[in-house]
Image (cartoon, helix red, strand yellow):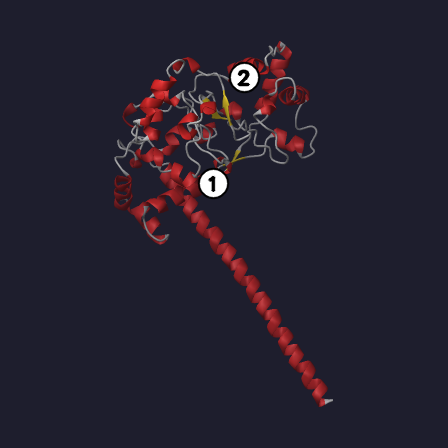
């Protein structure tokens, strides 16, 4: 009986030790996740302060937030953005909501890593205009609130700046809109006109060919590059000469923002494939009613004009006119406006 008792006592002790190990291991994982989440939040908060700081521009007047305005879904209401010293570029600033979900960046898709993208506007001469990354780091080091924050996170470096800005941008998410609720089963979320507009979007108007409605939370983009027919006249008959000029440029970002005709080459500047001449990235349509003007160069002022232009070129691509009645146009616009929602910040 004593042997039997010792056996059960030993087994009880082993069971207790095992339970403690599992519990402590679980606590360790939870603590690790909590620490990681806290760390991510600190990086994002620092990135948010950098995003809004005009002192990181050459003239101290322009921040990232100057051209990506929160009240307009982090886009710009101007056709093309105005940078340091009043310089204007060639591109309309796109919305930054859900930017963390993209696989290619800029209208021409010339970059594929967000960590690289976030540093480029700081030294682009027509955006924030700093002379170099070294100047950026000197400015940050001389500002105690930034210097201290970086010190607490491991030190100031270009990689650390990129990490902070990227962490902030990944927090910028579009909120739930009426279409999301409709897809989730709330059949009253879209009214009769909006439902008719949805049918046009996926059917007659063929918008969904490029602005795809994925299952679940639709992103309204195929993440591809298409020919829009926007200002093609700027490069017509001049492609060979433009390519020769492009070959002589060292800073692609500065070139695209200062030379409109080279900017008109579109995705070609990234791939050098003839099929990509004058092709531009399909933007998401989430919050589209808040992001006027439209197209890569901001040349289309209103949502109504954008619909008319898209329907026109869609007809050309299909080889037949795509005519819509006044009522259908109104319904399609009603659906597009239903894609707006408060931002999830």
Label whose residue precedes the other's in the sequence (2 or 1): 1
Q: Residue at x 61, y 15 (%)?
A: 330
Question: For mark 2, what is the residue?
Answer: 310
Location of residue 41 with respect to 222 vertically, above or below? below
Would you call the spot at circle 1 few (<14 residues within 10 Å), some (14-19), or many (20 or more)? some
Q: Position of residue 85 (x, y in %)?
A: 27, 26
Q: Quadrant of residue 212?
A: top right
- In the visual, does 264 lie left or right of 131? right
- In the visual, does 303 lie left or right of 66? right
Q: Residue at x 30, y 31 (%)?
A: 250
Location of residue 306 with respect to 104 vertically, above or below? above
Location of residue 109 with respect to 114 vertically, above or below? above
Q: Quadrant of residue 11?
A: bottom right
Would you call the spot at circle 2 few (<14 residues within 10 Å), some (14-19), or many (20 or more)? some
Question: In this orientation, which residue lies closer to the viewer: 257 or 229?
Answer: 229
The alpha-carbon separation of the residues under discs 2 and 1 comes to 30 Å
- Residue with the most extreme bottom position: 2
Q: Position of residue 202 (x, y in %)?
A: 64, 23
Location of residue 87 with respect to 36 vertically, above or below? above
SS at circle 2: helix
SS at circle 1: loop
Q: Position of residue 180 (x, y in %)?
A: 62, 32
Question: For mark 1, what is the residue?
Answer: 170
Q: Residue at x 33, y 25 (%)?
A: 246
Question: In this orientation, which residue lies closer to the viewer: 254 or 57?
Answer: 254
Quarter of the image that includes the N terminus: bottom right
Q: Which mark is residue 209?
A: none
Of circles 2 and 1, the one toward us is 2
Q: Position of residue 133 (x, y in %)?
A: 29, 40
Is residue 70 visible to us here? yes
Kindly indicate whether the residue at mark 1 contacts the one at mark 2 (C-beta within 8 angstroms). no
Q: Quadrant of residue 7?
A: bottom right
């Amino acid at each position: 009986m004593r042997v039997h008792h010792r056996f059960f006592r030993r087994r009880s002790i082993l069971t207790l030790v095992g339970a403690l190990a599992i519990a402590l291991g679980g606590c360790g994982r939870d603590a690790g996740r909590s620490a990681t989440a806290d760390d991510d939040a600190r990086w994002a908060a620092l990135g948010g302060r950098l995003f809004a700081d005009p002192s990181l521009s050459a003239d101290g007047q322009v921040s990232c937030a100057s051209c990506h305005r929160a009240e307009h879904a982090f886009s710009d209401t101007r056709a093309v953005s105005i940078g340091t010293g009043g310089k204007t570029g060639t591109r309309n600033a796109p919305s930054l909501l859900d930017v963390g979900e993209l696989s290619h960046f800029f209208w021409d898709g010339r970059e594929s890593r967000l960590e690289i993208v976030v540093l480029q506007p700081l030294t682009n001469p027509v955006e924030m205009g700093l002379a170099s990354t070294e100047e950026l780091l000197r400015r940050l080091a001389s500002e105690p609130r930034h210097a201290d924050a970086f010190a607490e996170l491991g030190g100031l470096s270009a990689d650390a700046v990129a990490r902070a800005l990227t962490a902030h941008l990944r927090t910028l998410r579009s909120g739930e809109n009426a279409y999301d609720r409709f897809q989730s089963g709330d059949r009253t979320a879209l009214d009769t006109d909006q439902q008719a507009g949805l049918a046009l979007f996926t059917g007659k108007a063929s918008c969904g060919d490029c602005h795809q409605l994925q299952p679940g939370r639709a992103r309204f983009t195929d993440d591809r590059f298409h020919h829009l027919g926007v200002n093609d006249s700027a490069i017509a008959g001049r492609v060979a000469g433009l390519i020769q000029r492009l070959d002589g440029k060292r800073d692609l970002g500065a070139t695209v923002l200062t030379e409109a005709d080279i900017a008109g080459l579109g995705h070609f500047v990234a791939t050098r494939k003839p099929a990509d001449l004058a092709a531009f990235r399909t933007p998401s349509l989430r919050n589209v009613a808040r992001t006027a003007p439209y197209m890569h160069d901001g040349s289309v002022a209103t949502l109504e004009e954008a619909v008319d232009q898209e329907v026109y070129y869609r007809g050309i691509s299909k080889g037949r006119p795509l005519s819509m009645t006044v009522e259908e146009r109104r319904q399609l616009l009603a659906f597009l406006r239903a894609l707006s929602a408060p931002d999830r910040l």
